[in-house]
Amino acid sequence: MPTPDEQPLTARLDTADAPILAAVLRELAMTNTCGGCTERWTATSWAHCSGCHRTFAGVGLFDRHRTADSRCQDPASVRDGNGKPVFEYRDGAWRGPEMPPEVLAKLRERWSVTQ
């Protein structure tokens, strides 16, 4: 007989939890849309600009594409202080550049959990 921690989540839920679970699943499955364009997205952390109708993978990236006087900049043309692109378009949104593999490996090594 499996212990409670080994049982699937659905087997561990009390029927009283069903409305809460249903609400969480609805929110996770929610599709966001823009009234001014045909863009659709499901990530709750993404930000869509109602000015230029571009979607960003986070509020900080959204903020970065705006100028001090609240105008939109083309994400493809925004550069950092070294002249490198700030944004990349991947998986349906403007994102920051991917982490170099060697940096990612070091982070994984540093934060790995030993058992």
Image (cartoon, rainbow, N blue to C red):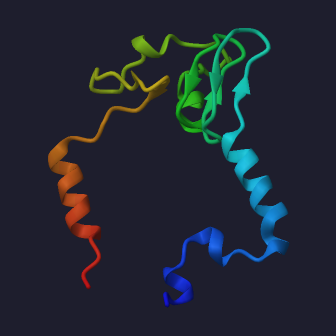
Q: Nearer the viewer, residue 35 or 62?
A: 35
Residue 67's x, y, as percent? 59, 19
* Snapshot quadrant of residue 48: top right
Residue 31 position (above or below residue 26): above
Q: Nearer the viewer, residue 50 or 24?
A: 24
For image coordinates 61% across by 41% down, the residue present is: 45
For image coordinates 54% across by 22% down, the residue present is: 65
Residue 12's x, y, as percent? 65, 78
Residue 15 position (above or below residue 22): below
Q: Nearer the viewer, residue 66 or 87?
A: 87
In the image: residue 3, left or right of residue 41: left
* Snapshot quadrant of residue 97: top left
In the image: residue 5, left or right of residue 34: left
Q: Nearer the viewer, residue 47 or 74?
A: 47
In the image: residue 47, left or right of residue 8: right
For image coordinates 55% across by 72% down, the residue present is: 8
Residue 9's x, y, as percent? 60, 70
For image coordinates 31% across by 36% down, the residue present is: 98
